[in-house]
Image (cartoon, rainbow, N blue to C red):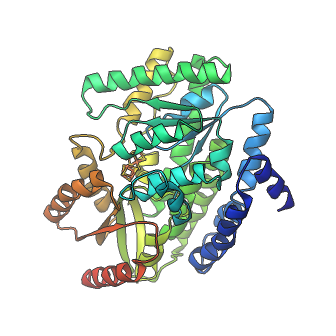
């Protein structure tokens, strides 16, 4: 702790303000996570990471920086980690998921901005998150308008590179994204001083594919009637995957997947037989946003899948490996990343198809479509989501919420009624 304090001071953090966050997080984690029964033993690693979330990984990153490596902070699953890793850089996800940071964001952003953006900006400007201090460069992307404008504000405080993401998925858009990835690679080479070679990019593509496969193995076990891991725990694994070392992430996820597979074989479920199975779809749940999972899983249901960027969108689809030239590799990356289905694209039919497909694959009783307040993209897309689920005969509940606890009881009432309606 004393070492952490020195590190946070050296990072220029507002340690007094940060103390307030350090005081509430362990209680919140204890209430939401440690109160669960019969968790897989493999969750011990993730509990350990959260117990010192602003200490362990930040000190690893600082150590790497001392050895000349650069840290790139990202906000979106369209930014290809592979390119950074191929130049011996490190990627750290930066999306803010705590109400604690929202107030700081509201000092410079309209109140009617989504909480994910407000929290991300607040965490940087209030100097209360080490990850936001450590990153040498932020990488933004032209997804939603709120993020685009927020990047201009963040760019006054930290080196910022923006990737111009197309908003349609025609052949020419995929070519354009490949070009954009190539430009990003040139920037990463310049910033790190390291050349990206075909071999290095192949290795990086392999590393991230292995991480995707490991996470997919855990999700695969959630399709079973026996539910070997709670939705809350699966969400935590995904949230930590955004900033952990990718090889370690794959190793720990594979260990957890081994255990979950064994639990399925042995019939070990964390929920009683007959518990209603829920899939969540919508905007991402950045750490430590555990609100909805906690409410659902203490309302007689289990979350078995998340069609979200902190869920299936993060690991589905692999990048083609072992290609012989950088241009082919950039195109392969583009093809894979353009299979992500964010509501900033139009049309976005593939997401609607995915939701129905996943609801069937995970054998869910109902879907909760959850959107962060003031995210008009996902809010507007709800119409298509509900229509497709209605046509497929799958019950759906639409929810809009933020990071504050003020609506928790109201949400609980609605979710309990929905679960009861599922029979
Ligand atoms: S690919 S979902 S991570 S942009 S919730 S900030 S869209 S107003 S987070 Fe996202 Fe990339 Fe899309 Fe995924 Fe804007 Fe909406 Fe806020 Fe959002």
Whether residue 296 can be seen here: yes
**Taking 228 as reference, is 333 above or below it?**
above
Q: Is residue 320 left or right of residue 174?
A: right
Q: Is residue 24 left or right of residue 371?
A: right
Which of the 4 quarters of the picture holds residue 418? bottom left
Which of the 4 quarters of the picture holds residue 211? top right
Q: Nearer the viewer, residue 378 or 199?
A: 378
Q: Is residue 146 left or right of residue 139?
A: left
Residue drawn at x 18%, y 58% is: 383
Whether residue 244 can be seen here: no
Q: Is residue 215 left or right of residue 332?
A: right
Residue furthest out toward the right: 2
Residue furthest out toward the front: 107
Residue drawn at x 54%, y 56% is: 239
Q: Nearer the viewer, residue 125 or 325?
A: 125
- Quadrant in which the N terminus appears: bottom right
Count of residue discs: 0
- Quadrant in which the C terminus appears: bottom left
Whole-percent x, y for residue 167 in the image: 29, 35
Whole-percent x, y for residue 224 in the image: 42, 66
Q: Nearer the viewer, residue 313 or 222?
A: 313
Residue drawn at x 30%, y 43% is: 344
Whole-percent x, y for residue 138 in the image: 56, 37
**Taking 183 as reference, is 30 above or below it?**
below
Residue drawn at x 61%, y 72% is: 29
Whole-percent x, y for residue 360 in the image: 28, 61
């Amino acid at each position: 702790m004393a070492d952490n304090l020195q590190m946070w001071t050296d990072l220029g953090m507002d340690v007094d303000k940060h103390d307030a966050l350090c005081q509430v997080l362990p209680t919140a984690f204890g209430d939401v996570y440690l109160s669960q029964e019969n968790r897989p033993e493999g969750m011990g690693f993730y509990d350990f990471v959260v117990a010192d979330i602003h200490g362990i990984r930040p000190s690893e990153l600082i150590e790497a920086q001392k050895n000349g490596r650069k840290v790139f902070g990202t906000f979106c699953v369209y930014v290809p980690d592979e390119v950074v890793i191929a130049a011996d850089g490190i990627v750290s996800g930066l999306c803010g998921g705590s109400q604690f940071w929202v107030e700081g964001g509201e000092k410079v952003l309209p109140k009617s901005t989504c909480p994910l953006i407000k929290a991300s900006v607040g965490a940087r400007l209030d100097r209360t998150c080490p990850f936001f201090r450590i990153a040498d460069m932020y990488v933004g992307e032209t997804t939603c308008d709120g993020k685009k404008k927020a990047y201009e504000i963040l760019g006054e405080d930290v080196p910022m590179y923006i990737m111009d993401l197309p908003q349609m998925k025609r052949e020419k858009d995929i070519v354009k994204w490949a070009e954009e990835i190539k430009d990003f690679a040139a920037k990463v080479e310049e910033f790190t001083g390291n050349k990206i070679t075909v071999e290095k990019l192949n290795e990086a593509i392999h590393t991230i594919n292995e991480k995707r496969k490991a996470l997919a193995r855990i999700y695969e076990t959630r399709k079973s009637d026996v539910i070997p891991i709670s939705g809350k725990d699966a969400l935590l694994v995904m949230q930590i995957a955004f900033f952990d070392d990718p090889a370690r992430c794959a190793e720990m996820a594979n260990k957890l997947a081994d255990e979950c597979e064994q639990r399925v074989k042995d019939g070990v479920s964390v929920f009683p037989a007959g518990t209603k199975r829920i899939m969540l779809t919508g905007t991402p749940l950045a750490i430590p946003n555990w609100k909805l999972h906690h409410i659902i899983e203490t309302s007689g249901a289990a979350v078995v899948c998340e069609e979200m960027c902190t869920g299936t969108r993060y690991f589905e689809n692999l990048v083609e490996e072992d290609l012989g030239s950088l241009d082919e590799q950039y195109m392969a990356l583009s093809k894979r990343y353009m299979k992500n289905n964010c509501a900033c694209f139009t049309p976005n039919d593939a997401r609607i198809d995915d939701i129905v497909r996943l609801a069937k694959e995970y054998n869910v009783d109902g879907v909760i479509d959850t959107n962060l307040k003031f995210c008009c993209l996902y809010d507007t897309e709800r119409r298509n989501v509900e229509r497709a689920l209605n046509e497929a005969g799958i019950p759906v509940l639409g929810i809009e919420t933020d990071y504050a606890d003020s609506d928790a009881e109201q949400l609980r009432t609605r979710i309990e009624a929905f679960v009861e309606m599922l029979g």
